[in-house]
Amino acid sequence: MTQLRGPLDGVKVVACSTAQAGTVPYMLMADLGAEVIKIEVPEKGDNTRAGSVFPGLPSTIFETNNRGVKSVTLNLKSAEAREILYKLVARADIFGQNFRPGAAEKNGYGYEDLKKVNPKIVYVSISGYGPKGPNARLPGTDSMAQALGGIAEAYSTPGQPMRTGIVSVADETCAILAFGGMLAALHCARTQGIGQKVDCSLLGGQIRLMGWTLTTAMWRNRNPVAGQARVTGTPERPGISASFNDVDGKPLVFQLRGVKWKAAMSALGFYDTLVTAGFGDLGAAMVSDERRETLLKTLDQLFATGPRDKWVALLRGADIVSAPINTLLEASNDPDVLANGYVTEVEYPKHGKKLKVHGSPWQFSETPARIGIAPELGEHNEAVLTGLGYSAATIQGLRDRKVI
């Protein structure tokens, strides 16, 4: 049987990128069949290679962000190494980097340099703050973008200090937006013959992630009410998305529009109590902040009388959107996550075991994604350089001179 090729088969990528936002876009491309050549520093490699917390196993951060790519080592401070990079770029569709702003230009592989080598190249640059503005030349990290982009408020508790989260949502959001942006630019290059630079930033990704809630805040010129619930709309057309703890302290969430309020609360057996409290209609909670808090406290007490699984089942039975609030470990074992392959297992021959990893967020009916593993440092030096026409002796000379 002929092995199906991925939907991005034939796309060639060269990435001088590290960290999370700078590597995940290309890992996703490799999952989908693109040939991705990752450029690393000789002997040392990507800093995250040293991030292992499990003796004898790969670094979880490096493995998660670099699976399926090819590793080539180049000392880009060397003229010989830059010449190799230019040869790779001449054959590539996409080039990516996330160095500190100005570093690529200083070292001969900025956009203006590489478009001379390949006018149709899609050049992807990822920064902390974006290419303009007072802090454009500062380095950036996930926590910096979370701090500036508003997400800390999204998960804040009234009366408590705002904090950034443990999951790298700024990195991942930027990475996914970069993935989409480079595919759009690649389409343009292939249909119109025009290469271009695509700038993405950690901060820009976080702002986009805030969605319509940010629009509402800007139009009202005040921050949204934070905490366990979003009570939105108007008294005539209300909506609610809220979380509550069950009898054992396990959290759940439900979301509905006001027209389903009576059906949902009746299914739970709460409706008569809510009517007595003056909440036969959800719109009553929108009269004032005080009434909103009274409703939430009443629901807190009601949900604390039974188990989470029961409440979720009753709400779903009434065609109300509801779910348990998973921990990270619970999420990795969620039946829908596993059934759809969002988490899967991959064989690691070097370690003699299968390990659970991220699957693919997409399912292609004809060209499925293929989940690989991350490369050893410089694993593909010989194969790639041979493909560029370098002899074995020349490759050894490059190694001896620490060019590769």
Image (cartoon, helix red, strand yellow):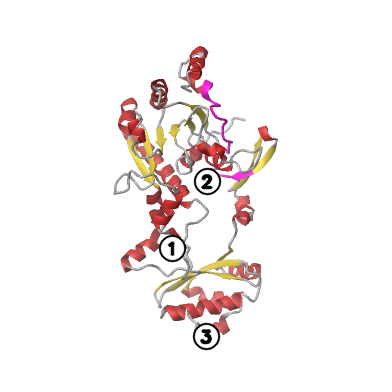
- Element assignment for label 3: loop
Disc 1 designates what residue?
A: 153
- Residue type, label 1: Glu
Task: Give residue 85's position: percent from left, percent from top.
Answer: 41, 25
Closest to the camera, between mark 1 and mark 2, is 1
Identity of the residue furthest to the right in this view: 352
Disc 2 designates what residue?
A: 362
Task: Give residue 49's position: percent from left, percent from top.
Answer: 55, 37
Task: Give residue 112's position: percent from left, percent from top.
Answer: 30, 31
- Residue 270 falls in image quadrant: bottom right
Task: Give residue 20's position: percent from left, percent from top.
Answer: 48, 43
Horizontal side of residue 137 vs 353, given as left or right:
left
Q: Work out which quarter of the rendered image holds the N terminus and state it.
A: top right
Horizontal side of residue 333 vs 320, given as left or right:
right
Residues 119 and 268: in front is: 119
Instruction: Compute the Cα span from label 1 to label 2.
Output: 30 Å
Residue 173 higher or lower than 248, as above or below: above
Residues 140 and 390: in front is: 140
Residue drawn 41% across and 20% down? 80
Residue 100's disc number: none
Instruction: Compute the Cα span from label 1 to label 3.
Output: 30 Å
- Element assignment for label 1: helix
Disc 3 designates what residue?
A: 277
Chief SS of the magenta region: loop
What span is in magenta? 356-382
| Sequence order check, earlier mark of 1 and 2 | 1
Residue drawn 33% across and 33% down? 105
- Element assignment for label 2: loop
Residues 120 and 142: in front is: 142
Residue 210 higher or lower than 23, as above or below: below
Q: Is residue 29 magenta?
A: no
